[in-house]
Image (spheres, coloured by chain):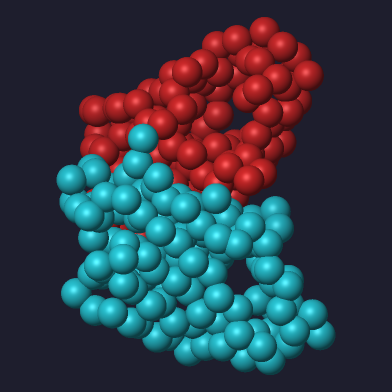
Amino acid sequence: QQQVKQSPQSLIVQKGGISIINCAYENTAFDYFPWYQQFPGKGPALLIAIRPDVSEKKEGRFTISFNKSAKQFSLHIMDSQPGDSATYFCATGGSSNTGKLIFGQGTTLQVKP
Amino acid sequence: NAGVTQTPKFQVLKTGQSMTLQCAQDMNHNSMYWYRQDPGMGLRLIYYSASEGTTDKGEVPNGYNVSRLNKREFSLRLESAAPSQTSVYFCTTQVWMNTEAFFGQGTRLTVV
């Protein structure tokens, strides 16, 4: 079974700090790497996504860094805010995968005021 | 524009009972998926329908069946519920492969 390994499982950051969540994947055929954000009682929603033709993508305070050779990608949240407190999931997808997304185990982020 | 609608939102079943989780989308998307979310396990794919008229097993299909009724609707059936099926179930849709997945609000199922 193809896996996506996400770490850490939980993370506590002070307001204004940088939150970093990492994911590692196995299948080099994957070519779509999204991050999802989930608030309690809600379904996950797309936060930011990257394709393997670039090494970094930034949207506001959120940045994905992608290392194709290491088969790793990470989410960086700059100037973390209490409103960022949520569960974050990385995922991978590929054109050979009929659109299926394989999700990581999730990271619960708490940003302290 | 409702997006992805799941019913019911909450359900308690006794072991051995059956039920169907409903999912409907008004986004005209081709692909629909059922995931379950368990603490520490992330989101695991149960079944999916890449397009109308097709269904396939995902990572954890045992104990479940699905029906792609039409392009809009994709249902998940538990024939004989077990406590191990206690979970939060999410239906998602994608316009096609390698595109954004849109989630329903989830169904929280408890089997006692």
In the image as oriented, which residue stretches furthest toward the front?
A70
Asked whether A84 or B30 is in front, the reply is A84
Q: Quadrant of residue B54?
A: top left
Residue A82 appears in view: no
Find chain A in the image and tell me its colour: cyan
Q: In which quarter of the image is residue A31?
A: bottom left
Tell me if residue A82 comes above or below residue B107 in the rendering.
below
Quarter of the N terminus of chain A within the rendering: top left
Residue B61 appears in view: yes
On screen, residue A46 versus residue B106, left or right, reads: left
Residue at 38% over, 31% down: B58
Count of labels shown?
Answer: 0
On screen, residue A87 versus residue B59, left or right, reads: right
Quarter of the C terminus of chain A within the rendering: bottom right
Residue at 67% over, 11% down: B17
Residue at 24% over, 79% down: A54
Residue at 44% over, 37% down: B45
x then y, percent, for residue B51 = 24, 38
x then y, percent, for residue A23 = 45, 62
x then y, percent, for residue B100 = 36, 60
Asked whether B108 or A101 is in front, the reply is A101
Find chain B in the image and tell me its colour: red
Asked whether B29 or A103 is in front, the reply is A103
x then y, percent, for residue A111 = 73, 77
In the image as oriented, which residue stretches furthest toward the right?
A113
On screen, residue A95 versus residue B85, left or right, reads: left
